[in-house]
Image (cartoon, helix red, strand yellow):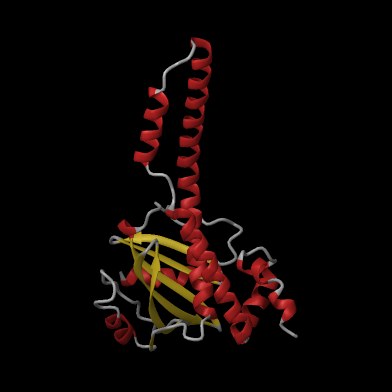
Amino acid sequence: MVCESWKAKLDTYLDGEIPEGEMRTFDAHVRSCPSCSGDALTRVQMKRSIQAAGRRYTPSAEFRKRMQQKIASRPRRSFGLGWTFAAAAAAIIVVGTLTSVYLGTRSGKDQVFSEIADLHVATLASSSPVDVISTDRHTVKPWFQGKIPFAFNLPELQNSEFSLLGGRMTYLDQTPGAHLIYDVRKHHISVFVFQERSLAARLDENPVSKKQPFNVETWSQAGLRYFVIGDASAADIDSLAKLFKTAS
C-alpha cells in the first residue's frame, strides 16, 4: 500500500525525531490521509496512557519516610557490618532523593511540553478537531462557560493574518482547559489555556528543548497558563501570543 512507507515512520514522526523538512511533509500527509491520521491518533493516545500509568505508582513522601524508619530501626549485628549497611542505605536514599528531585523538576517540565505537543498532533489528526466550529470569538468564548472553571479572553483578529477555526475542551495533568485552533497561511496553531495553580510542574518562560518539532511559546498571566504551539514560523507563533497577551 502507498501509506505503508509513511506508517513505518509514524513513531519516529510522533517523537519528533525526523528532519524538519520531512516533518512538514509528514504533517501535510497526516492531515490529508484518514488512515494515517487515525493511526497517529491511536498511537498518541496509547503514548499518553503509558505516561499516565507510569506516574500513577510514584512512591509518596510518606512511603519513603516509612521505609527510612524501618531501615533505621533494624538492630545492628556488628558495628562494622551495621555501619556498612547503614552507609549503603543512606547513600541509596540520598542519591534516590536527589535524583527524584532533579528528574521530577526537569522531566516534569519536559513532560508538560511533550503532552502539549501530543494534544496538538492528536487534535489535528482527529476527524473532529473542534467541538464548537466558529470564526466568531463571541460565539467560541461563551461556549466554554460552565465547562471549565475559569474565564479567558480571545483576541480581536481584524487586520491580522490569523483566523479562528473553533475550540474544544481538553485536559492536562487531569486539569480541564481550553484548546483553540487558529489558521495562518494554511498552518494550524493550537492555543491552550489552563489554570496555573492546577498544573503539577512549575514552568519558566519558554524552556523548550531544541528537539521540539514545533515552535512553542508559553507564559503565565492573571493566574492562567497559556501555550501557543504549531508548525507555523516562530514569528507567527509570537504574533499570536502577543494578541492573546493584549486581550488578557
Q: Position of residue 71 (x, y in %)?
A: 42, 27
Q: Position of residue 118 (x, y in %)?
A: 52, 68
Can residue 232 be seen from the camera position used here? no
Left or right of 77? Residue 33 is: right
Q: Residue at x 33, y 77 (%)?
A: 154
Quarter of the image where one finds residue 62: top left
In the image, 224 versus 155, the foreground residue is 224
Quadrant where the N terminus sits is bottom right
Q: Residue at x 38, y 79 (%)?
A: 168
Residue 219, placed above or below residue 145: above
Extreme-top residue of the structure: 79
In the image, 144 versus 229, the foreground residue is 144
Q: Residue at x 29, y 60 (%)?
A: 223
Quadrant where the C terminus sits is bottom left
Q: Position of residue 150 (x, y in %)?
A: 26, 69
Left or right of 184? Residue 197 is: left
Can residue 156 be seen from the camera position used here? yes
Left or right of 129? Residue 211 is: right
